[in-house]
Image (cartoon, rainbow, N blue to C red):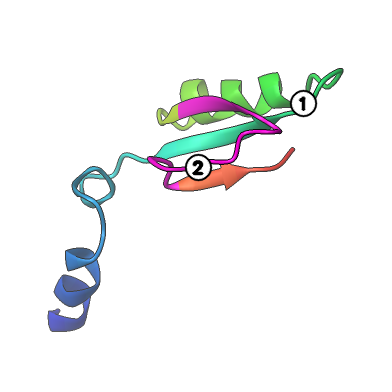
Amino acid sequence: MRESLEFTRHLSPVTRHGFMNFGVIVFPGSNCDHDCIHVISSVLGQKATPVWHKEISLSGLDAVILP
């Protein structure tokens, strides 16, 4: 029990409550990113943010999906 408490102390408040912010990399001419965003938001119930492939900052994201 102590180990799990120590682990969750390092997580963001959002992650501790079971919600994550996913970034989905978007490439020109690709439609796989739409499928990923649909699954993350509609099926998993998590926040999915499209991220342009030339973006240099990934701050605020808990995970990044590269379709």
Instruction: Name the residue: 17% across, 76% down.
Output: 6
Q: Is residue 41 left or right of residue 8?
A: right
Q: Quadrant of the N terminus?
A: bottom left
**Earlier-in-chain disc, 2 versus 1:** 1
Up-down: is 54 above or below 34? below
On the image, numbered disc 2 is attached to which residue? 58
Q: Is residue 34 left or right of residue 3?
A: right
Q: Is residue 38 magenta?
A: no
Kindly identify the amino acid type of the residue bearing the numbered disc 1: Cys
Q: Within 10 Å of the Cα at label 2, are there few (<14), some (14-19), or many (20+) other Cα atoms?
A: few
Q: Is residue 55 magenta?
A: yes
Q: Within 10 Å of the Cα at label 1, are there few (<14), some (14-19), or many (20+) other Cα atoms?
A: some
Q: Is residue 59 left or right of residue 14?
A: right
Up-down: is 8 above or below 51? below
Which span is picked out in magenta?
48-62
Up-down: is 6 above or below 30? below
